Amino acid sequence: MALKLHSSLNVHVGDFLKSEIVAPTGMSVKALADHFGVSRQALSTLLNGNAGLSPDMAIRFEKGFGIKADTLMRMQTAYDMARARQHEQHIAVKRLNNAA
């Protein structure tokens, strides 16, 4: 029996970063992108939940805000796995016997 997480736990890391880390500072996406040395579009796409978090961007948030990059990457992985589990019944792979 597979453990199914409640859908409220499947929060995109970008949504978390936007609401809990960036918004309280009052800093604009453009200003933060400039500070991070990335494009405004790349940062905006992440913060709006339309792109996944890269390790490089996670490190930028760690350096900028002190939140551990490893924690952010675990959040991204958990989100990705939750999304994949939503359609796992369509992945037709049989278990291998005696796989080496």
Image (cartoon, rainbow, N blue to C red):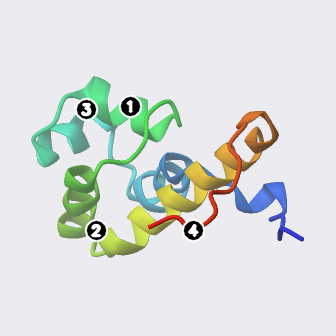
Residue 13's x, y, as percent?
51, 53
Determine the CA span between mark 2 and mark 1.
17 Å
The answer to whether 77 appears left or right of 87 in the picture is left
Viewer-proximal residue among 43 and 98: 98
Mark 3, residue position: 30
Query: Label 2 sits on what residue type?
Result: Phe
**Is 86 on the left or on the right of 37, as rendered?**
right
Dot in front, 4 or 3 = 4
What residue is at 45 percent from the left and 40 percent from the top?
47
The residue at which mark 1 appears reads as: 44
Residue 20, image x and y in percent? 52, 61
Q: Earlier in the sequence, mark 2 or mark 3?
A: 3
**Position of 36 relative to 20 (above/below):** above
Indicate the quadrant where residue 44 lies: top left
The dot on residue 98 is 4
- Inter-mark Cα distance, 3 to 1: 9 Å
